[in-house]
Amino acid sequence: MVNELSSITSEVQAVVRDARRVVVLTGAGMSAESGVPTFREVQTGLWERFSAEDLATPEAFDANPALVWTWYRWRQALIGQVSPNPGHMALAHWQHRLRSTGGELSIVTQNVDDLHERAESEVLGHLHGSIAVHRCIDCAEPAQLPAPQYDGFTAPPAPEEPPHCPLCTGFLRPGVVWFGEMLPMEAFESATAAIRQADCILVVGTSGMVQPAASLPLLGLERGTPLVEINPETTDLTELMDYSLRGPSGRLLPELLSTFSGVG
Ligand code: BJW
Ligand code: ZN
């Protein structure tokens, strides 16, 4: 049964402090305080008529490659201009701290940004790929592109066709996982293996609406692993949790870490 908490109790502190093998599953809320919009927020500018579900599909790219491509390049540019927030920094400190004493903290993220890495965390798996890598939609050849630059994000950019693959006529596409596509097998398998060995699972900033990522905490539930959620809102996963900490991860992760270490 879920224990909804507006502050960090000594019970949840003890669960987290005593864990030696921690898995943290992160979602878009993790990067929200850095200024990266979440998926279920209403979009702005050129994209205000579309939901993320309308754009993050192979069908959308087929139907309107310029619209979808420009959405991704705009988001990539935005991600390039923001910085990790105190939540990312707290996880990096915690990972280094656990590793220095023979433990492990595995970060499994649904996010396509690199803010965990820029906070100097090692990420076990990017379940939904990475926005900064590209490949051909037809022959899958990887391609390197310069980082996009948009000025100030005041005006939406005009839609631009994606570049073509140097080997064939296919369009380049972002290296992310769209609805209906398989997740990268290595990332998913590493995530399930880490969860099966975890003695505490934190679920941070995800609505828990997108499968199969949202089912990963169930693997811990089957083994009786304590599940702790950090999210300002109730989610589809809240019912499964042992503890749900209500608030932003940029505040709660440093607070949680500071309760059992000097860092935070
Ligand atoms: C804060 C905060 C703060 C705010 N601090 N928190 C079983 C049942 C039903 C459907 C399916 C199923 N299995 C598969 C499906 C289909 C589909 C699916 O899940 N659909 C659902 C919508 C129902 N899944 C798939 O298609 C997946 N592929 C697959 O299953 O392949 C096998 C297969 C293939 C073919 C047929 C059958 C099976 C692929 C899913 C790919 C998802 N891709 C995206 C886009 C990535 C590229 C991009 O960036 O554009 O990934 S969609 C989008 O959702 C993105 C995210 O990673 C993902 C999850 O979103 P997330 O992170 O939870 O964000 P939000 O916005 O939903 O929530 C933010 C949360 O933050 C909220 O809770 C806020 O409260 C909170 N928050 N501020 C902490 N400061
Ligand atoms: Zn090609």
Image (cartoon, rainbow, N blue to C red):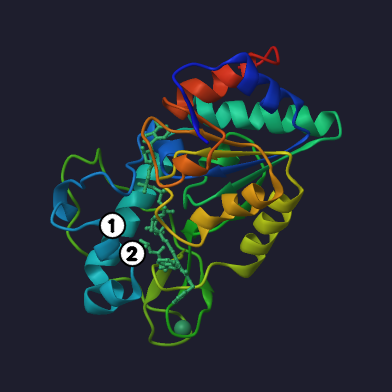
- Check the picture and name the quadrant holding the C terminus: top right
Report the residue at 17% width, 58% height from top.
Answer: 158
- Residue 215 percent coordinates (x, y): 53, 56
Q: Amino acid at mark 2?
A: Ala
Report the residue at 68% width, 26% height from top.
Answer: 15
Report the residue at 63% width, 14% height from top.
Answer: 10
Name the residue at the bottom extreme: 168
- Dot 1: few (<14), some (14–19), or many (≥20) neighbours within 10 Å? some
The verdict on label 1 being within 8 Å of ligand 1 is yes
How many circles with numbers are drawn on the protein?
A: 2
Q: Nearer the viewer, residue 12 or 64?
A: 12
- Residue 66 percent coordinates (x, y): 24, 69
- Judge left or right: residue 20 versus residue 28: right
- Identify the disc placed on residue 52: 1
Secondary structure, mark 1, is helix
Instruction: Provide the residue designation for mark 2.
Output: 56
Mark 1 near mark 2, Cβ–Cβ under 8 Å?
Answer: yes
- Judge left or right: residue 175 versus residue 95: left
